[in-house]
Image: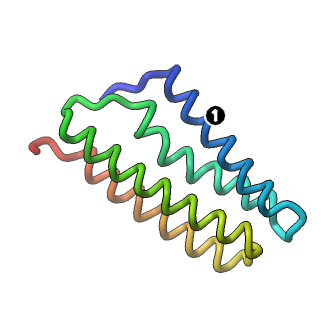
Amino acid sequence: MKANIFLTVISILLAILTGYLAYSVAEGRENDVICGFVSTVCFAATLVPVIGIQFDSIKLGVNIRTFSILSFFIFLVSHLCFAWFGVKMPYYIITNGILLLVYLAILYKMIGITNI
């Protein structure tokens, strides 16, 4: 596994722009800044493995990228729904926290796989 710094920066900037999208949808509602920040963190966690990291095994790389893209779209739908309908902090934190922790746990296990 090798990180490409330039592509990692691009993926983080893309996550910031997507987080700003969630912020602008939620603008004027309660906790819109928190929605934008948490969206950026979740999008960065999913976009860095897709764009910024090269894996030693091609098969493992395809599996991780596919899983990360699917997780990105799940986060996108979740964050935009919360932004559109209004962020209720307990539901927002619990739902997206569980999604992020499950994603990171599965990603951790996938990176540890040596034989595919």
The residue located at (22%, 41%) in the rendering is: 60
Q: Quadrant of residue 15?
A: top right
Image coordinates for residue 90, horizontal then vertical, percent: 68, 79
Side of 2 relative to 74 (left or right): left
Q: Quadrant of residue 61?
A: top left
- State the colouring used for the structure image: rainbow
Residue underneath mark 1: 13
Image coordinates for residue 36, horizontal then vertical, percent: 73, 54
Side of 64 relative to 90 (left or right): left
Q: Quadrant of the C terminus?
A: top left
Q: Quadrant of the N terminus?
A: top left
As rendered, which of 69 and 112 lies closer to the eye?
Answer: 69
Asked which secondary structure carries label 1, the reply is: helix
As rendered, which of 24 and 98 lies closer to the eye?
Answer: 24
Examine the rendered structure and indicate whether residue 66 appears above or below residue 7. below
Examine the rendered structure and indicate whether residue 54 appears above or below residue 28. above
Q: How many marks?
A: 1
Q: Residues within 10 Å of mark 1 (few under 14, many from 20)?
A: some
Q: Quadrant of residue 86?
A: bottom right
Image coordinates for residue 38, horizontal then vertical, percent: 66, 56
The residue located at (33%, 28%) in the rendering is: 54
Disc 1 marks which amino acid?
A: Leu
Side of 22 relative to 15 (left or right): right
Farthest residue toward the right? 28
Image coordinates for residue 84, horizontal then vertical, percent: 73, 69
The residue located at (72%, 75%) in the rendering is: 89
Side of 51 relative to 110 (left or right): right
Examine the rendered structure and indicate whether residue 29 appears above or below residue 106. below
